[in-house]
Image: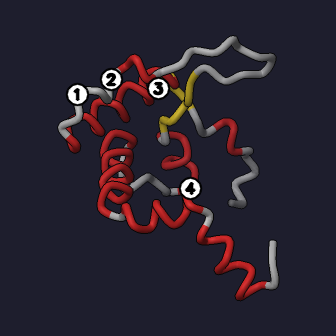
Amino acid sequence: MHSGLTPRYWRRNKEKSFFHRDKKIIEILREKTGDEQINETLITHVKDRLGHDRRYGIDPTKIKEELGWEPEIMFDEGIEKTIEWYLNNKEWMERVISGEYLEFYKRNYGGI
């Protein structure tokens, strides 16, 4: 990245709020699992804190123009593929949640 521009100038327009992101995750999970208990009641609103972001700026137009780069996968498709990966790899998730992965690090790296 040698254009002389800082990355903050590349994120513009097409913004998604965190609430949009959360609703999309819930929508996909409910559709993929058929579990009607996965709904917006799972979203917990918290008091904003100083510097708390309320949205993402994810329009890659300027970075495409300046560097010739563009994302291969946009947000909606990417989040769906990510959720599908987790749903298809429940065994991996169980090892992470259980802490089993820590044993791997201890064995191979002498602890964390």
Which sits earlier in the primary sequence, circle 4 or circle 2? 2
Q: Residue at x 21, y 43 (%)?
A: 32
Q: Quadrant of the N terminus?
A: bottom right
Q: Are marks 2 and 1 in contact (CB under 8 Å)?
A: yes
Q: Read off the residue under disc 2.
A: 39
Amino acid found under the numbered disc labelled 3: Lys
Q: Earlier in the sequence, mark 1 or mark 3?
A: 3
Q: Nearer the viewer, mark 4 or mark 1?
A: 1
Task: Indicate which disc residue 67 carries.
Answer: 4
Task: Identify the residue shown where x is 78% and y is 21%.
Answer: 51
Q: Is residue 112 left or right of residue 10?
A: right
Q: Amino acid at mark 4?
A: Leu
Closer to us: 108 or 49: 108
Dot 1 and dot 3 residues touching (CB under 8 Å): no
The residue tagged 1 is 36
Where's the C terminus, which quadrant?
A: bottom right
Mark 2 lies on a secondary structure that is loop
Q: Is residue 3 left or right of residue 35?
A: right
Q: Amino acid at mark 2?
A: Asn
Amino acid type shown at disc 1: Glu
Label 4 Cα neighbours within 10 Å, binned few <14 / some 14-19 / many ≥20: few
Q: Which mark is residue 16?
A: 3
